[in-house]
């Protein structure tokens, strides 16, 4: 007796394209080989489903996409995700050739800039907005 694998079978009435997807497509990838296989399937689903949220394969496409995104987030963290606020502000100051006195207005005084850079004080919402505006960056860099 042969074992039958569970599959999702779908034939598009418009394109006559056939999909025979093993249920394992719902499994999160655990390595780059599985990732590549799921990515290929996702590309095919995107071509078929497009932006039709009511398409029978839309939920399959969504789950595969979310699993790939989770794999990416776990294995390839966003650039700068491990940089502290102090390191970021220090880098911005250095790259813009600024001194502590140049940020005094944002921090409410040069002493507060010094306390922040020494790790004695966290950034306030007001300071984050000030740094965002001064350096033309997203506040997201400070919100982890």
Image (tube, grey):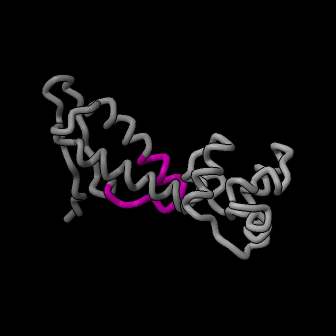
Q: Would residue 96 be found to the left or right of residue 46 on screen? A: right
The quarter of the picture where the N terminus appears is bottom left
Name which residue lies at 19% across and 44% down: 9
Q: Residue 10, relative to residue 99: is it above or below? A: above
Name which residue lies at 21% across and 49% down: 8
Query: Dominant secondary structure of the magenta stretch?
Result: helix
Q: Position of residue 72 (x, y in %)?
A: 52, 54
In depth, the one of 1 and 117 nearer the eye is 117
In depth, the one of 91 and 52 nearer the eye is 91
Magenta residues (range) = 26-38
Residue 80 occupies quadrant:
bottom right
Whether the magenta-drawn stretch holds residue 27 is answered as: yes
Whether the magenta-drawn stretch holds residue 44 is answered as: no
In depth, the one of 133 and 63 nearer the eye is 133
Q: Would residue 119 be found to the left or right of residue 21 on screen? A: right
The residue at the far left in this view is 13
Name which residue lies at 79% across and 53% down: 91
Q: Position of residue 110 (x, y in %)?
A: 79, 62
Name which residue lies at 44% across and 47% down: 37
Q: Residue 74, relative to residue 12: is it above or below? A: below
Q: Position of residue 93 (x, y in %)?
A: 80, 50
The quarter of the picture where the C terminus appears is bottom right
The residue at the far bottom in this view is 120
């Amino acid at each position: 007796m042969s074992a039958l694998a569970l599959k999702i079978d779908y034939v598009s009435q418009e394109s006559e394209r056939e999909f025979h997807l093993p249920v394992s497509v719902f499994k999160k990838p655990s390595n780059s080989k599985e990732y590549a296989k799921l990515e290929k399937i996702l590309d095919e689903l995107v071509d078929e489903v497009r932006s039709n949220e009511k398409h029978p394969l839309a939920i399959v496409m969504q789950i595969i996409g979310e699993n790939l995104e989770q794999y990416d987030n776990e294995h390839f963290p966003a650039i700068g995700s491990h940089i502290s606020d102090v390191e970021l502000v220090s880098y911005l100051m250095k790259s813009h050739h600024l001194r502590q006195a140049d940020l005094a207005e944002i921090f409410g005084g040069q002493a507060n800039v010094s306390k922040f850079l020494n790790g004695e004080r966290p950034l306030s919402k007001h300071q984050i907005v000030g740094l965002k505006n001064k350096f033309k960056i997203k506040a997201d860099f400070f919100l982890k």
